Amino acid sequence: MVVKNTNDLKEGDFVFAAVRGYPPWPAQIDKIEHKNNKYRYFRVIFFGTNETSKCNQTNIYPYEEFKNKYGIQRENNAKFNLALDQIRKAQNCNGQTTPKNIQTKTSGSKKKSLSTPKSPQTPQIFNNTTMETKNLNQKHSPDTLPLQSTVVEDSAKMNNNHNNKPN
């Protein structure tokens, strides 16, 4: 049996972190917080999901010591298997990567980067109409103006026809 020693762990180390309802999951220590001299909390980033959690030292298992016990591929858990692949790739990079910036292969030959999404770029173009968010003035292409004026003319005709009905 492997004896767990969390005293030697430091920020950036690879671990398995246990959270209620999930198996011990591949993670990397982001920050260590000391409640007192005896008890420590570990903030970890989970591989495969990029979620973070605060775990106490009883739920942290050093990766090297426990990879034969917890690092086994699972048939019906694709996210866990992805997390195992990511932690292995990160370990091969000598710990210079984090769960947030690892490139992983997804179905097909495309690579997917696991990073936070970027905000949409402005200006946005819709059917030759440019809308600028910083400027309240809208620029329209010539082909959209007749359509708008036709609608106005049609509604004016309807109002005139309604007013011209005999009583």
Image: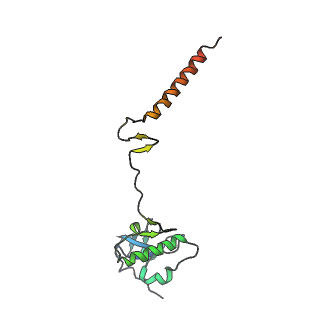
Q: How many marks?
A: 0
Q: Position of residue 105 (x, y in %)?
A: 47, 70
- Asked if 41 appears above or below 1 in the picture, the reply is above
Residue under the image location 42 percent in, 36 percent down: 141
Residue under the image location 57 percent in, 19 percent down: 159
Please tell me in which quadrant of the rendered image residue 112 appears: bottom left
For this orientation, the residue located farthest to the front is 143
- Asked if 133 appears above or below 148 in the picture, the reply is below
Q: Tell me the colour scheme of the image.
A: rainbow
Taking depth in this image into account, of 99 and 24 the one nearest to the observer is 99
Taking depth in this image into account, of 72 and 59 the one nearest to the observer is 72
For this orientation, the residue located farthest to the right is 167
Residue under the image location 55 percent in, 24 percent down: 154
- Asked if 124 appears above or below 157 in the picture, the reply is below
Taking depth in this image into account, of 21 and 91 the one nearest to the observer is 91
Residue under the image location 43 percent in, 75 percent down: 87
Q: For residue 17, say whether it is visible.
A: no
Taking depth in this image into account, of 89 and 28 the one nearest to the observer is 89
Q: Position of residue 42 (x, y in %)?
A: 39, 71
